Image: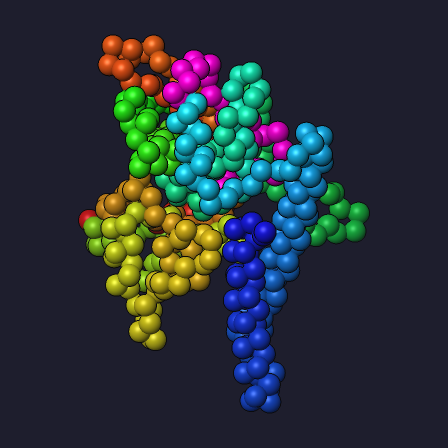
Amino acid sequence: MPSPLINTLRERRRRVYDDAKSLADLAAAENRAFTDDEQTRWAALNDELDTLDQRLTDLREQDQRAGQSEAAFANLLGGAVQTRSAADTDLDARFRAAILENDRRPIVVANPCERSGYRPGVERRDLATTSGGGLLPTSFFDRIQRHMVESSAILAAGATMLNSRTGEPIKIPRSTAHSAAAIVTEGGTITEDDPTLGSVTLGAYKYGFLVQITHELATDATFDLLAYLGEQAGIAIGNAFGAHAITGTGTGQPRGVLTDATAGKTGDDTTGGTFTADELIDLYYSLAEPYARSAAAGWLMNTSTLGAIRKLKASGTGDYLFANDVPAGTGAAGTLLGRPVYLDPTMPDVGVGAKCIAFGDWSRYWVRQVEGLRFERSDDFAFDRDVVTFRALARLDGALVDTTGAVKVFEGGSA
C-alpha cells in the first residue's frame, strides 16, 4: 500500500498536470502561442512536474526496499510480518493481560532507526519486553508517533526525521553562501570566491511524562486502554517538542524555526502588525524558487491568524486567497496560494513585531530522534494507591539546517 506521502505527491502532481494542460488547451483553442506570462507559468509547472516525478521515484524505491527487508526478516523468524489490523480489541485485551501478570520488567518500544528511510506514521515496529518476547504488535508504536505528528505542525508539514542509536552531538555541515563567478578578460586575474560553510549541531533533549491508571481501569473491558495511553503519550511529548520546534532558543532546548527564519515581508508601520492580501503574496514570492516549488513547501500559523486570512480577497478578482481544499494525506487546514496551511497554537498571534506567519520548505527543518520511544511501567511507584505508573520518554532535538532562506516569515510592522 502506498505511503500517505506518496498519495499526497500523486495528488499534487495531478493538480500541476491539470494546470499545465489547461494552459496548453487554452492557447491551442485560440490558435496562438503562449504569452510571456503563460510561457513563464508553463516552464514553472514543468519544472515542478520534474521535481515531483523524481521525488515519487525515490519514495517508491524506498518503499520497495523496506518491503523487501520486512520479507527477509520474516523469513529469518519463520513467520509473516505483522501488520496493523482492525482487531484493536484483541490488542487491548493482551495489553491488559500483560499488566495483570504483574511483570515488572519495562516495556520498550523498538528503535525505529533500525531501518533507514523512517518516516512518522509510516513504519511499524513491535513492542517487546526486555527478555525479547513479543508483547504487542504494531499498533501501539504507530499510535504514539501518529499523535506526536498531530501535535506538532512542523512534523506534520514534512520535517526531515534523522534517527540515531546514540545521543552524542551531531554536527551537520551546511552552506551559507555559494561561490560567484564573473567575466574574466583575456589575461586578467581570476577572482577567488570560496563558498561559505558552517554547521549546525543537533543534540538530544529528553522529554518525558508519567501517566497512572488504576487496577480497576486495567480490568475494565469497555475502555480502550491501549488507545488512551498511546494518545496521552503522543500528545504530551508532541506538544512539548512541537512548541520548542517553533520558538525554541537552542539553549537548553531545541532551536525553533522562528529563531533562524528570515523576514520575507514586514507589514506596514501604520497597521499595528496586521497584513494584507498583497503582503501575503509578497511573502510567498520572497522565497527562492527551489524552496517554493518543493513538495514540502507550506504555511505555518495559528488558528486566529488563519481566521483573519480567510477574510482576504485578491485585488482585481475578488476571490478569497484561502481555499478549503485539503491536499490528501497532509492534515492541513486548507491551501493558501496553492500551498497547504498547517496550524500550530505555538505560532504567535498577529501583532506589532510578531512573526505570525511562516512560509517555506519544511524539509529543511531537521528533527533528530535518539533510540526509540521508551514506554516503561512500575508497580512500586504508587503502590500505596494500587495504581500502575507508566512513563513515556523520547530524546529529540531540532533545528533549521538551511538558514539561507528556506523559511521566510511575515513580521508585523509597528503601530
Which residue: 52% across, 42% down? 84
Vertical relation: 337 (above or below) 256: below
Task: Inspect this view and state whether residue 370 appears.
Answer: no
Quadrant of residue 338 in the image?
bottom left
Q: Is residue 235 magenta?
A: no
Q: Position of residue 105 (x, y in %)?
A: 46, 14
| The one of 195 and 226 positioned closer to us in this rendering | 226
Residue 13 falls left or right of residue 152: right
Which residue: 58% across, 35% down? 174
Which residue: 55% across, 77% down? 23
Residues in magenta? 99-121
Q: Is residue 113 magenta?
A: yes
Which SS does the magenta portion mostly show?
Answer: loop
Vertical relation: 335 (above or below) 240: below
Which residue: 41% across, 38% down? 89
Q: Position of residue 232 (x, y in %)?
A: 34, 32
